[in-house]
Image: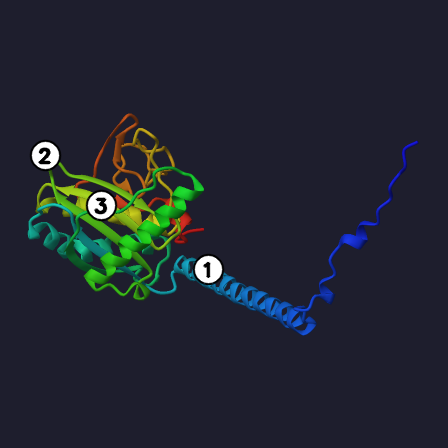
Amino acid sequence: MGRTLLVDLRENVPDDTHHPGFHPAIVHVSAERSRLFFRIRVTVLSAILAGVAAWGWRDRVSRRERNAWEHTLHVAIVLLRVAPTPDSAFASLRARGPALEDRLQAEARRYRPGIPRPFLFAFFGPIDETALPPVPKSDGVVDLAEQSWRSWRYYGEADARAGVDAGAFDTRLYVVVRASSVEGRTLAEGRSEEGGRTGSVEMELSDTDSADFALLAVAHELFHTLGAEDKYDERGKTRIPLGLAEPELTPQFPQRFAEIMARNRPVAPDRERPPDSLDEMAVGPVTAREIGWAR
C-alpha cells in the first residue's frame, strides 16, 4: 500500500530575519527613503501640473479679454522671405498697414460707436527663411502635438531673429512672402489658431500694387485668432447669406463689399470677384458677433 507523504513547506522557506547580514534598521531606513522620494516626485509633478493649469487658465482668460474690446490689441506682423523678393514688396506692406488699421476701426465703430481703436500693427523683418512654417500632416492627436512643438520652435526662432517680444503682443501673424512665379498673379493662403494667438499667411506678390490683397489675407487670419469662422464653402464660393457684408441690402446683389471672412465680393447670385483694395472689405453681422463687436 502506498503511503502519503505530507510535507510542511514552511520548513523550507528561508527566514531572512535569522540571516547573519539582516539588519532591520537598514530595511526600515530604505523603506522610509523610498516613500520620501515618492512623495517628492508626486509633489514636484503636482506643482508642475498646477503651474501648467494656472498658465492655461490665465492665457484663456487673457484671450477672452481680447474680445471685450476694452483696449487696443497690439498685433505683430513678422515678415519672412523664403525666396528672392524685392524689398519694395515689403515696403508696400508696411506702408499700407495704417490704412488697414483705419479700415478696421471704421468697421468696428459701425457696430460699437466709441470703441477704442481695435488694432495697432507693428511690422518686423523681413528675415530670410529657408523653410515654410510647419503644417499638420493629419488631424491625429499625436500629429497635432508634434505640429504644436514644431510651430513653437519655428515661430520662436523667427521671433528671436526678428527681435519680437512675444509677450508684448496680443496676437502674432507670420507673413511668408515670395515673388510671384507667374507674372501678374497674386496668391495668398493662411492658417491660424481659431481663438488662439498666432497665425500665418503664405503669399506670392506680383508687384507693389498687390499689398492691399496681401493685407486682406492678413486681416482674415487675424479674425480667425479672435474666433471668426470662414464664410465660404469648399469651392471657395461665398456662403449666402452668412458671407455677405450687407445681407439686408435691397436688391441683395451686387454687394458693395467683400466680407472679411469670405474671399470675394458677390456681384450676382452666381458670380463674385476678388476685392481690389482695403476699401472694398467689410465685416458682416455674423462675423461681428463672433468676435464680440455685436450681440
Which mark is in front, 3 or 2? 3
The chosen color scheme is rainbow
From the viewer's side, name the closer residue of 238 and 151: 151
> In this picture, is 162 found above or below 190?
below
Q: Look at label 2 and name its amino acid.
A: Val
In this picture, residue 142 sits left or right of residue 269: right
Question: For residue 115, what is the image quadrant?
Answer: bottom left
Name the residue located 18 percent from the left edge and 52 percent from the top edge: 80
Q: Look at label 1 and name its amino acid.
A: Gly
The residue wearing badge 2 is 182
> In the image, residue 60 lies at what x, y percent?
45, 58
**Going from the N terminus, do you reach mark 1 or mark 3 first?**
1
**Residue projecting furthest to the right:** 1
**Going from the N terminus, do you reach mark 1 or mark 2 first?**
1
The residue wearing badge 1 is 56
Q: Is residue 155 visible?
A: yes
The residue wearing badge 3 is 132
From the viewer's side, name the closer residue of 285 and 11: 11
